[in-house]
Image: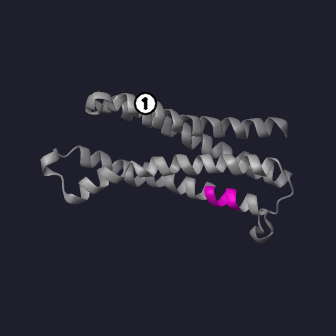
Amino acid sequence: MFALVWIHLLAAVVWVGGMVFLSVVLVPVLKRNGAFAQYALLFRTVAYRFRAVVWGAMGILVATGLTLAAGRSIPLMEPSRWPTIFAAKIGLVTLLFTLTLLHDLVVGPRVRRSLGVPEAERSARDRVLLRYSVLVPRISLLVALLVLLLAVVLART
């Protein structure tokens, strides 16, 4: 069980740590002096590589999380009997997975298409998308941090 907890935590740290790195370190450095356009290829390459790591971590988290929950005698097939903290954590994990899917499969590709259009030719919809698309990863990071908080609370109960 110890090894399983360690693997579960390692996958969470990789995912959340990468989110923090991208949001707090890489993007601000690349945006410095308005030079983000120069580094778009670098950012895209890093983001694609991180996406593969994230999806691997998500798979590990699901597999180890289900096993850990079963080991704690949480009736996985009876959500009405779940401890409140566990139910809240699963709800936030579901939201985080949904946001990740939304970011990777919908928002990201649309942003790439919009950025491929000269600025003067972008539609109002493109401009709105580009302005608000940054919210998805920011909300994802906040949700991920809340999941970690609930994980700590759950481990202490």
The residue most toward the front is: 33
**Toward which corner of the image does residue 41 lie, by quadrant?**
top left
Locate residue 122 relative to residue 91 in the image: left or right.
left
The reply to whether the magenta stretch includes residue 93 is: no
Residue 35 rendering spot, x and y as whole percentages: 27, 29
Which type of secondary structure does the marked residue at label 1 adopt? Answer: helix
Position above or below: 40 against 109: above
Count neighbours of disc 1 (C-alpha within 10 A) and say few if under 14, some if 14 to 19, many if 20 or more: few
Kind of residue indicated by mark 1:
Leu
Residue 69 rendering spot, x and y as whole percentages: 79, 53
Tell me which segment is drawn in magenta: 88-92
Instruction: Determine the main secondary structure of the stretch shown in magenta.
Output: helix
| Residue drawn 57% across the image and 58% down it | 95
Label 1, on which residue?
Answer: 26
Frontmost residue, 39 versus 1: 39
Frontmost residue, 106 versus 95: 95
| Residue drawn 37% across the image and 35% down it | 44
Q: How many marks?
A: 1
| Residue drawn 82% across the image and 48% down it | 156
Residue 117 rendering spot, x and y as whole percentages: 19, 46
